[in-house]
Amino acid sequence: MSVSTIKSNKCFGGQLIKLSAKAESYNGLETKFNVFVPEGKGPFPVLYYLAGLTCDEDTGATKGMFEGPAAAHGIALVFPDTSPRGAGIAGEDADWDFGTGAGFYLDATAPAYASHYRGFTYLTQELPELLKKSGLPLDLNRQSIMGHSMGGHGALVLYLKTLALGKYASCSAFAPITNPTLCPWGTKAFAGYLKGGVEEGKEWDATELLRSGQAKGELRIRFDWGSADNFFQAGQLLPENFLGEVKSLGVGGVVGTQREGYDHSYYFIMSFAAEHVACESEFFACCLIQCSQRSQSTQST
Amino acid sequence: MSVSTIKSNKCFGGQLIKLSAKAESYNGLETKFNVFVPEGKGPFPVLYYLAGLTCDEDTGATKGMFEGPAAAHGIALVFPDTSPRGAGIAGEDADWDFGTGAGFYLDATAPAYASHYRGFTYLTQELPELLKKSGLPLDLNRQSIMGHSMGGHGALVLYLKTLALGKYASCSAFAPITNPTLCPWGTKAFAGYLKGGVEEGKEWDATELLRSGQAKGELRIRFDWGSADNFFQAGQLLPENFLGEVKSLGVGGVVGTQREGYDHSYYFIMSFAAEHVACESEFFACCLIQCSQRSQSTQST
């Protein structure tokens, strides 16, 4: 397990570094990730960004507009890829919403995918080890996670499944898929990746993880979605289900906000990137209350 | 000459609107452009962004990170394409640095290109008319122009050639090609687009426009380039020639700054986007002096 540097670009006084490694979690396939390291000595807390369907490690780094705010707050950013690439599984490249570029950040159990599609293990265990090996000035004891759409699902699920371990200080998401066992993207993914299909998918469903009581600990979650998001309108995101479960359980620490007129694009993400990073910065400092109070038009807390 | 809306995305409280028109300057070919209109009534001053080789109307809009600062300063942004598309000229698509995506923002005179490649006329005359027809709340009496690389060349040349007319309040550029008659990209472009070749290219060369005395008026130009920019290192940009001419002529109002360690990428652009937009905002308010004073490590004024 070694890490090599592909290139480095100076950015907001720091460096945007593209790295490569052969990932054991991906059965030895090469995977790439970008790391933004702010100017200064560090070590810097680490904020992961998980991208959505069809995206890769460059999407958030080039279109999300997170680097400026991260530089201002002294936070490092890590942008992984959205799936293994080149596994050579039959049908892997047939659809845009399944297979390559659409790993759903889970550990597959269906025989065809189980040896390569292990995004959960890669992200929660192997990638932090790779980051340690990189020698970059990162404080891996202070991690947080965010994401968009499928990546918002990934951020919520990784956060909730590791909540008792305290792996991530908080979770932030843009237009996340919050109840994938009940939406077309999720049911397709679970049917393909999991031998137990959609029923097994409840283990990878943020709303179900809340409902089942598996996510133990104080929650620090914020997410936004746009009222003009066609995928929200089509029932792919279902934030109302997640927030309904939060309300039903009577737990705090979750701020979900509908942003009027915004859609699913990176124009939406860039509009709130600075606010999310500022909020993560407060989360790193354990100040959820201030963050919640600052947010407007809150739907549920 | 009519304008149609392809789509609109809410962005930083305003709208990023993709428009389409059949451009007379491009011999009737369809061309697309993005317009960012801030929240509010307007009319808003207009800042054009000309992109570089291989780019299109989306590049600056998605990767430049200009919208946030533009929203904060109440400035509209216009992102045109980098050439006509689909002219069907033999050899037009053979190279990445000539033809499609590489129009160099000039009016071609070589017979093969003269009827379609008229970017100067399109940008200075037709596009403002199209923007008027769009009905968007734009103040076309307050325009300014910026660009990157080939687009930086375009911004400088459009600004200097129309200086006496006061078409643009100011010019701002990232890693511009400032002396194209003396660099490989420029000589190739001029040899192909102009019947008089590189000699005729002096009419489209920012340094030559200064030297010949054609650019009459008070200058308001700022540009940045990176010391680690491989195209700067390869002699494609030649900022030293442009700044040398400024010094030789003893004119003021030009701020050229080398940014240590930055390269030619959008990671460089995004790092200084807010500063350029803030400076343009001051230019719109006719405050060049404050802007110049704020800039550090100035090489020439």
Image: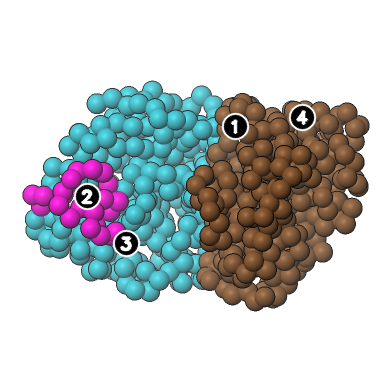
Chain colours: A brown, B cyan
User: Is residue B188 at least partly visible in the picture?
Assistant: yes
Relative horizontal placement of residue A151, taking residue B49 as reference (left or right): right
State which tag comes first along the sequence, 2 or 3: 2
Q: On residue B177, which mark appears?
A: 3
Within 10 angstroms of label 1, few (less than 14), some, or many (20 or more) residues?
Answer: some
> Where residue B215 appears, x then y in whole percent?
24, 52
Within 10 angstroms of label 3, few (less than 14), some, or many (20 or more) residues?
Answer: many
Q: Secondary structure at mark 4?
A: helix
Task: Pick the quarter of the image with the C terminus of chain A.
Answer: top right
- Residue A81 in the image: above or below residue A223: below
The secondary structure making up most of the magenta span is loop
Relative horizontal placement of residue B177, taking residue B188 as reference (left or right): right
Residue annotated with mark 4: A241
Q: Report how far apart the C-alphas of labels 1 and 2 lie in the structure.
A: 42 Å
The span picked out in magenta is: B83-112
Q: Chain of mark 4?
A: A
Q: Chain of mark 3?
A: B
Instruction: Verify whether residue B111 appears in magenta.
Output: yes
Q: Residue at x 79, y 50 (%)?
A: A159
Q: Residue at x 78, y 33 (%)?
A: A242
Q: Report how far apart the C-alphas of labels 2 and 3 lie in the structure.
A: 14 Å
- Identify the amino acid type marked 4: Asn
User: Is residue A171 at least partly visible in the picture?
Assistant: no
Q: Secondary structure at mark 1?
A: helix
Q: Report how far apart the C-alphas of labels 3 and 4 lie in the structure.
A: 54 Å
